[in-house]
Amino acid sequence: MGTEHVRYGIIGTGMMGLEHIRNLGAIEGARVVAVSDPHGPSLAAAQATVERSAGGLGDHAPSDGVLHTFSDHRDLLAADLCDAIVIASPNMTHAAILPDVLDAGLHVLVEKPLCTTVADCRHMVEAAGRGPKAQVVWVGLEYRYMPPVARLIDEVRGGTVGRAHMVAIREHRFPFLTKVGDWNRFNRNTGGTLVEKCCHFFDLMNLLFEATPTRVMASGSQSVNHLDEAYDGERPDILDNAMVIVEYGGDRRASLDLCMFAEASRESEEISVVGDRGKVEAFLPSGRFRSGLRSAGPAGVEEAIVHDDRVLHEGFHHGASYLEHVGFLDAIRAGGQPDVTLADGLLSVAVGVAAQRSIERCAPVTLDEVLAG
């Protein structure tokens, strides 16, 4: 595309839509020119965020000096203002919005989860396959880019641990935040907690093993959060804790320990990979990274705080969303391939669906079953 500004449209201007605007406002060559959301206050928040993130717009200002706002994403697309789109609307809307963006031939970054069902994810993959080859279609699984996690991935791929056999991920954190219309309180809108929240972690497992899982076993419940809430007489049904085991074949497995009423935690996320040669670990929010070899024992364990000097906006995800956008913009300019594909997005959702199904059945669930239907 050369060196001219890439014009972005943001579809969905809730919490994550505003975060994308702030990230783009810190990136040279990116310009948010249009936003859409059916919720008036969210559109107003987007206008204010564009102005603040661009320092009163300045070099990031739309070419005509106006941020164009729309209540319907189809009107935004029809206005032909943008080169790239970010879809940050609620999970259950992705399956209806993404095909419209694909048909428009625009580059697109769609927030996680790709969709709430495997069938809808598969339809998105098929729709993208019919689009122009130069169209960059990227899924927002940004945990890959958190600096200590990116270091961990690099170390595993570089052979530090030898052959990786075990991945363990723990997330102990605060409950789900309040969203517009409280859509995230119900499985039918989110895909379930293990899709909505944990597709990030299942993507990391798949990436670290570079494989498709074979079987998932899970146990979980709604034990503490949202029990006293009701919306139009309906009580939330989302899980607030779970333990998941994901098998990969070849004597490799991963585990997830999720608790969403664990505010009394110093590290909200801990990720470890153990192989036949050694072990690596990443911790958030501290940014700590640890590495050690079996041959050296505990005395040989090394620890460092990992930063990425490229990050100009830390945001909600320790700079990961910023780095994700840098990669997305680079792919647009170079006509390259996305780092995170629709196939990656589909597989991360499939593992989450298998885990939700395993809890419902009190039985293991194979990925073949989930991917087939």
Image: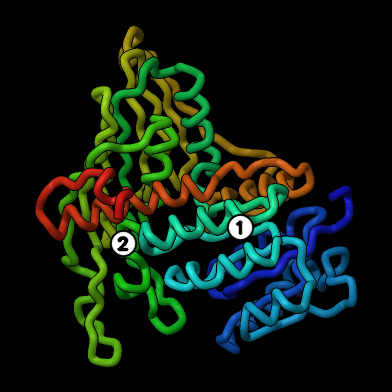
Which residue, as the protein is rendered here, is positioned at the far bottom? 232
> Residue 256 sits in which quadrant?
top left
**Which SS class for mark 1?**
strand
Q: In this view, does 5 lie above or below 329?
A: below
Work out whether residue 190 or residue 107 is closer to the camera in this orientation and state it.
Answer: 107
**Which SS class for mark 2?**
helix
Residue 303 pos. (x, y %) = 45, 26
Q: Name the residue under label 2.
A: 193
Q: Mark 1 points at which residue?
A: 109
Mark 1 or mark 2: which is in front?
1
Mark 1: which amino acid? Answer: Leu
Residue 258 pos. (x, y %) = 27, 52
Mark 2: which amino acid? Answer: Thr
One can see residue 113 in this view: no
Q: In this view, does 60 lie to the left or right of 9?
A: right
Q: In this view, does 43 lie above or below 264?
A: below
Residue at coordinates 54% horizontally, 75% vertically from top-left?
14
> Residue 120 sits in which quadrant?
bottom left
Badge 2 density bin: few <14, some 14–19, many ≥20, Cα 10 Å? many
